[in-house]
Image (cartoon, rainbow, N blue to C red):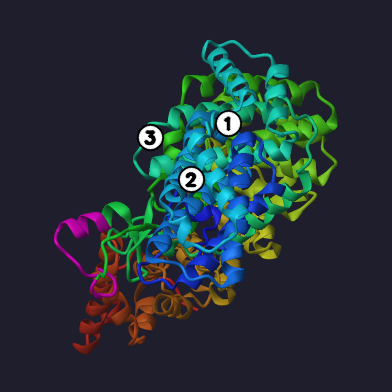
Amino acid sequence: MILKFDQTDRRILTFPAVHPCEGISPATLLSSLIDLSQNICNYQSKLFATQRKNAREAIRQIGLLLLFFEEIRDRGLVLSDSALLCFSELHHAFQKVQFLLEDCTREGARLWILMKCQLVATHFRAPIREIATALDVLPLNLIDVGGEVKELVGLIAKQARKGKFEPDPVDEWASKQVFSVLDRFQMGVEPDSSLMKRVLDNLEIRNWNDCNKEIKFLEEQIGFQCSDCDEREVPFLSSLLGLMSYCRGVIFETWNNRNNDQSDARHSIEALSCINREDFRCPISLELMTDPVTVSTGQTYDRSSIERWLKAGNMTCPKTGERLTSTELVPNTTLRKLIQQFFAEVGICASKSGSRSRDVARTISPGSPAAAEAMKFLSGFLSTRLVSGSSEQKTKAAYEIRLLAKSNIFNRSCLIEAGTILPLINLLSSSLDRHTQETALSALLKLSKHTCGKKEMIESGGLKPILAVLKRGLSLEAKQMAAATIFYLASVKSYGKLIGETPEVVPALVELIKDGTTCGKKNGVVAIFGLLLHPANHQRVLASGSVPLLMDILSSSNNIELIADSLAVLAIIAESVDGTLTILQTSALSTIPRILRSLPSRTAREYCVTVLLSLCKNGGAEAIAILAKDHNLMSSLYSLLTDGTSHGSSKARALIRILHKFHGTSSSGMNASAVPCERPVHVR
C-alpha cells in the first residue's frame, strides 16, 4: 500500500502522494497507516542539518497518532465509512510528510534545503494542516477507544491547527550569510572563508567528501532544470555550485576521499570504453540523444523526435509498431547519465558523431556572474597551490582541476588563464608517485580539450613529459591518458606534424595497442587516428607495424567501439596505394566482409565499406575478384543503402557498381583488369 520511492526516482521537494483507492479494505488502510507512521518516526534518528524544529514537531505529532492507530488495530475495532475517509486523507498527508523528511535528510542537499528554508517550512505546514482538518471531521465519538486516547487525538488536532512551522532562526541566519557571500562574489570581491566555514559547520558539511556530495547534487539539479527547458533557477543553482566548488578547493585542505575517487574514476573509464554508442542513438533521428525518454512500450527515443512523432497524430511505437497505451514520456535518467559520462570521459572516439553534448555545450558561458567570479578566484588559488604547496597540496590541486575541467568549458578557460598548465607539467615531470602522475595527467587531459589548453601545453614544453609517460608511465592508466592527450594535441595540424616527427611516439602507441587493456588499446588506436589526419604521418604509421595489430583486433575483439575505431584507422590507411598494399598482406578481404555481415553497429559497417572500396580502387582486379566471390557481400551492401547515412550509402553504392561491372566484364569474356583502378597490386 505504501508507495516506495528511491531518492533518484523523484525530484527533490516534489510530493507524488496518492489517495488510497476507494475499495481498499479497512484493515489494509489501517495497516498501511501504521507502517507509514512508523517509517516517519524512524526519522528521529536521522540528521537534520536544517528544519530541525519543524521536523521534530511533525514526527512528534505523527508518533502520537501512531498510538491511536495501534489501539484501533489491537482492539479490532470496526471503522465507519466516514472514519475511513478521514484515514484516507491522513494517509495522503503522511506520505507528503515522509517525502519532506526524506528530502531534509537527503545526502548532498543540505545547502539547497537551507536556501529554500521558507519554502520548506511552508511544505511542512501544508500537510500538518491537512492532518488537522482530517482530525477535525473524524467521527471520534464513533470509535471505541479509551478516553485518554480521544483526548490525545483532540490535542494533536489543536496543535496541528495552530502550529506555526516557521524557519529556524539559525537557518535564516545561515541563508542570509550565503546570500551575502554570493553578493560579494558577484561584485568581484573574494569573501571571508571563515564565514563560509561557520555556515558549513552549521550544516555539518565538515570535510571534502561532504562538500563534494553537495556539488554533485547541485550539478544534478541543474541538469534536471535544463532537460525540462525550465531554466529559471539555473543561475541561482550555478551560483551555489560555484560557491561550493570554491569551498571544496579552498576551505577543505584535507582530502578525505582520495583513494575512493581515483578508484571510481578508473572503473568508470574502463566501463565506458565497452559501451555500444549505437544504444545512444534515437531510433527516429539516428542522432545521439540528448534527452532520452521512454514510452509505454519500453522503447527509448530522443524527446524532441518522439514529440514530433506524436504531434503528427501517430499513436504507435515507431520501433515496434505497437499501439501506445499512453502518451506519457518518462525521462530515462540512467541512460542520460551514461550519455553525459560518454561525452565527458570518452569524447575521444575516432568514429564519434559530430553531435556535441548539449549539457557540455551550455557550459561555454558561466551559469551566473557569481559562479564566474568564484571560479576565477578558485583557479588562482589552485594555480598558487601547484607552484608553492606541499606535495599533498599539489596533488589535491591537480585533482580539483581534473574535476572542475571534466565537463565544463568555462572552467577550463579559467584554469588555463590562471596559469595552471605549466605547474601541472612540472608536477608531471617531477612525480615519482603513481597516484600523483595519474592525477596530473588526468588534469592535463581535460585541459587539452580546450583550444587554448593545447597551445599552452605545447608552448610550455608539455609534449616531452607526456610522451615520457606514454613510454614509461608508472601505471597503465597513466599511459592510456597520455595517449588520449596526444589525440587532442594532434587535432591541431601543426602539433600533429610535430608529434608525428617525434620518433618514439608511434612505436609507443603501437605498444599500448599491443599490450594494453581494452581502454588502452582504444586510446592508442584513437591517438594514431589523430596522427593520420596529417598525411606526413602515414608512412610512419605504416612502418610501425600497426596494420597487423589492427587486423588482430578485428579478428579477436568483442568491443564494438574498439572495432569501429580500428576500422576508422584502416579506412584512412587504405586511401593510399602503399596503405592498401600493406592491408592486403593481411586477411582483410575475408575478415572485413565478415564484420560487415555480423556487426550491429552502423558506424562500424560503414567503415567496413569505406575500407573495401579503397582496396578495390587501389588493389585492382585481384582484390575485386576475391570480393566478387563472396556471395553474401552484396546483400550487406544493399542493406546499407536503406539504413545507412548518406555518406555510407554513397560508398556502398560505389562498391556495388564496381562489383557489378566486374561480374559484367567477366561474364562477357572481357579482361577483368579493365575494371578501373589506380594501380594494380599483388594480393596475398
Residue 527, image x, y percentages: 57, 51
Q: Is residue 463 among the parts visible in the rendering?
A: no
- The answer to which of marks 1 and 2 sits earlier in the sequence is 1
Report the mark closest to the observer, 3 or 2: 3
What residue is drawn where x is 59% and y is 55%? 147
- The answer to which of marks 3 and 1 sits earlier in the sequence is 1
**Nearer to the camera, 456 or 620:** 456
Q: Secondary structure at mark 3?
A: loop
**To which residue does mark 2 refer?**
534
- How far apart, in angstroms, are the residues tagged by discs 3 and 2? 42 Å
- The answer to which of marks 3 and 2 sits earlier in the sequence is 3
**To which residue does mark 1 refer?**
114
In the rendered structure, which segment of residues is drawn in magenta?
306-323
**To which residue does mark 3 refer?**
231
Residue 236, image x, y percentages: 47, 27
**Picture quadrant of residue 37:** bottom right
